């Protein structure tokens, strides 16, 4: 985009040699952070955040969640065996998923054809409970998944240095595999992963 100016989705997919669906999910994340914007005719151009990042010596803040969360989600999925996610608030009570690491199990939570870059309503979800500050003393919320009711979600907050909830880190797996005993083990691991990410911001 910097070299060529406004580009269509198909042009970007062709130049990056990625499927259009993957390109669109990545663009949604970049658009959420204002690194790219869409013109009236549907093409994509460089956004204000990207321009600022080229000239500002300030360290990145919340947008670094995507990069910093990668090894933490990898480790969490390895420890729990379940798919792990990090999401941030979107517009109109939605959640934008920045990154995911899928479970190695043949039966796992997928929901969509991949969650990364997806914007989904969060009303009634574990993510909403965390963002609204209704996390119990255990440090994590446990609920059935909305899209897949036979799946269980364990979610914990990621905080800024001032205590603001910046994101929600979660794991999701089949409910038959996440019984009370497994939740008691996995819950503290989700909290520890969220705390580890918080400490790196």
Image (cartoon, rainbow, N blue to C red):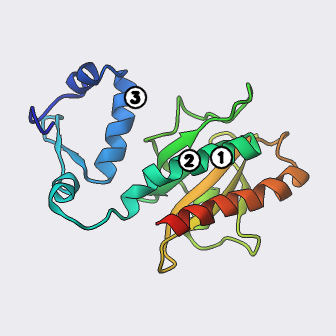
- Tag 1, which secondary structure? helix
> On residue 75, which mark appears?
1
Gap between marks 1 and 3, in whole Å? 24 Å
Q: Are marks 2 and 1 in contact (CB under 8 Å)?
A: yes
Q: Position of residue 146 (x, y in %)?
A: 64, 47
Tell me if residue 178 comes above or below residue 126 in the rendering: above
Q: Mark 3 highlights which residue?
A: 22
Q: What is the x, y in percent for residue 62? A: 39, 62
Callout 1–callout 3 Cβ contact below 8 Å: no
Q: Which one is in front in this view, the residue at disc 1 or the one at disc 3?
A: 1
Quadrant in which residue 26 is drawn: top left
How many angstroms separate mark 2 from mark 1 (CA)?
6 Å
Give the number of the disc on residue 71: 2
Helix, strand or loop under label 3: helix
Q: Are marks 2 and 3 in contact (CB under 8 Å)?
A: no
Question: Quick check: can you spot residue 151?
Answer: no
Q: Horizontal placement of 48 versus 63: left or right?
A: left
């Amino acid at each position: 985009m910097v070299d060529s100016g406004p580009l269509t989705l198909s042009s970007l997919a062709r130049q990056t040699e990625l499927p259009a669906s993957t390109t669109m999910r990545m663009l949604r994340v970049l658009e959420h952070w204002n690194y790219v914007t869409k013109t009236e005719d549907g093409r994509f151009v460089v956004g204000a955040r990207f321009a600022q990042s080229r000239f500002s010596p300030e360290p990145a803040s919340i947008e670094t969640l995507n990069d910093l969360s990668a090894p933490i989600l990898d480790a969490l999925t390895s420890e729990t065996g379940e798919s792990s996610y990090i999401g941030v608030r979107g517009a109109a009570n939605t959640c934008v998923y920045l990154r995911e690491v899928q479970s190695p199990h043949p039966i796992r939570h997928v929901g969509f054809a991949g969650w990364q870059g997806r914007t989904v309503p969060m009303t009634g979800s574990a993510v909403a409970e965390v963002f609204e500050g209704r996390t119990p003393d255990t440090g994590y919320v446990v609920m059935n998944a909305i899209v897949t009711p036979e799946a269980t979600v364990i979610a914990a907050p990621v905080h800024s240095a001032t205590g603001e909830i910046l994101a929600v880190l979660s794991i999701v797996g089949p409910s038959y595999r996440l019984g009370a005993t497994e939740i008691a083990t996995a819950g503290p691991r989700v909290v520890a992963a969220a705390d580890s990410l918080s400490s790196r911001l």
